[in-house]
Amino acid sequence: MSNNMTKTAEARKAVEQLKLEVNINRIKVSKAAADLLAFCETHAKEDPLVTAVPSSENPFREKKLFCIIL
Amino acid sequence: MCDQTFLAISFGPCDKCVKTKPLMNIYIKTDQFNYCSLCVEMMANEGLRDNETLSSLKNESETLKCKLEEERAKLHDVELHQVADRVDALGQFVMKTRRTLKGHGNKVLCMDWCKDKRRLVSSSQDGKVIVWDAFTTNKEHAVTMPCTWVMACAYAPSGCAIACGGLDNKCSVYPLTFDKNENMAAKKKSVAMHTNYLSACSFTNSDMQILTASGDGTCALWDVESGQLLQSFHGHAADVLCLDLAPSETGNTFVSGGCDKKAMVWDLRSGQCIQSFETHDSDINSVRYYPSGDAFASASDDATCRLYDLRADREVAIYSKESIIFGASSVDFSLSGRLLFTGYNDYTINVWDVLKGTRVSILFGHENRVSTLRVSPDGTAFCSGSWDHTLRV
């Protein structure tokens, strides 16, 4: 009995949610893809994993120990 | 509103028909009433408008779903990798393990970087949460949680606190102190209360709010100081396994992924689900926003990772290979968004070119499945945690 009530309430909510989702503004995939590309390209220089940084700036390089024998 | 409804059966006069019967305590538009079960049944039937039966609602939702797919397909004029053809391919990729952090007694389940780019916090199955300095591999703090399987941990943006949670159903915030004599466990503050395990947590832009995801199917936003629930997000049909907040410039949304194969995008302030994507074949283990905030990637037990664009409202790329049959447990983007790092249950980490959809490199090294993976805030390294009790940077 209360099962019926909850099921209809759930179904009603699902329908409302789907209506909202159908009506959102969408852009073309070509435009979205172009934007993703543009973002990658503008930020590629700052990305140390894409454009390798010299060893001197890599904070994780193996530390070379200098033993100075005085 | 609540994910569990409790029917308190009491005996007395019904508010509607005034007969003395067993009553049901129900809420209508936030008012509380005590009605007998007969009146409740009659009201439920009156509530249905003409022509609105359960089956008609179901049919309507099916047609709406088809319409949604059509609308999405209309704008699908080109594939991402076609557009990416004009971009140069990435050079040879060589990544080495620079640091191995040993010290956990059991499987590492989750980790997070601090904004200072050198500290990280990790949590494991044995209940320990450890803060490491990744440059020196020193352990700075260690906390023992009262529960095992600490599945979620997060570093506060200020670097002064950590949050963690797991099978204890709550999220606890520990302020980090450098005083050796202070017992960190004594300062613990319990912030979130869920009815099932905590699967993910994250601080919002400030130290004052935490977003949590739980096995009870809900996500919730809490105020750290008062422990109060600010907003809850209902909609997943099964456990929510992961969440990620949008990068700060683009606003108040977050994405969550769950065992119901759906990834849902929510508005933090209204609690509404804005978009949902259901193209995975299995549980979604991890979701991560693209650095620009316009897209997100998800990793799933169906051995694929997919990129969804939020503005085009559809899946735009799948990262999979026939040779990969083990589920992907975690995913993260490099700083520019060009590279996607994914950790798998077959002990490897695959690096994908986001735009072209091709695999750039495989990294070996862990001796058990990779459970968590995060790129450092400045992009110079990424850390992976695994069931082999270690973390590698």
Image (cartoon, coloured by chain):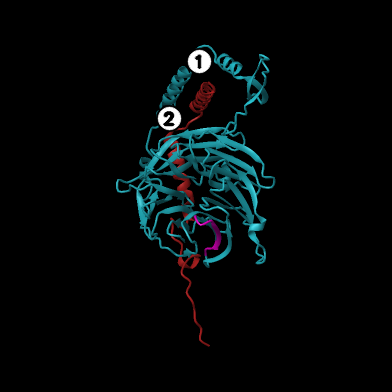
Mark closest to the chain's N terminus, 1 or 2:
1
| Stretch of the chain drawn in magenta | B125-134
The spot of residue B370 in percent (x, y) is 42, 54
Q: Mark 2 points at which residue?
A: B72
Between residues B364 and B57, which one lies in front from this camera angle?
B57
Between residues A27 and B41, which one lies in front from this camera angle?
B41
Chain seen in cyan: B
Label 1 or label 2, whichever lies nearer to me, is: 1
Between residues B39 and B78, which one lies in front from this camera angle?
B39
Question: Which color was chain A given?
Answer: red
Are the residues under badges 1 and 2 in a single subunit?
yes
Is residue B370 within the magenta segment? no
Q: What residue type is labelled 2?
A: Arg
| Rendered residue at 51%/57% (across/down) | B126
Per the image, label 2 sits on a secondary structure element best described as helix
The spot of residue B199 in percent (x, y) is 52, 46
* Badge 1 vs badge 2, beta-carbon distance below 8 Å: no
Residue B7 occupies which quadrant of the picture?
Answer: top right
The spot of residue B130 in percent (x, y) is 55, 60
Could you tell me which quadrant the N terminus of chain B lies in? top right
Identify whether B102 is placed above or below B84. below
Per the image, label 1 sits on a secondary structure element best described as loop
How far apart are the two marked residues, 1 and 2, measured between alpha carbons? 28 Å
Q: Mark 1 points at which residue?
A: B52
Q: Looking at the image, can residue B206 be seen?
A: no
Task: Specify the subunit that label 2 lies on.
Answer: B
User: What is the number of callouts on the image?
Assistant: 2
The spot of residue B390 in percent (x, y) is 46, 61
Quick one: which residue is furthest to the bottom in this view? A70
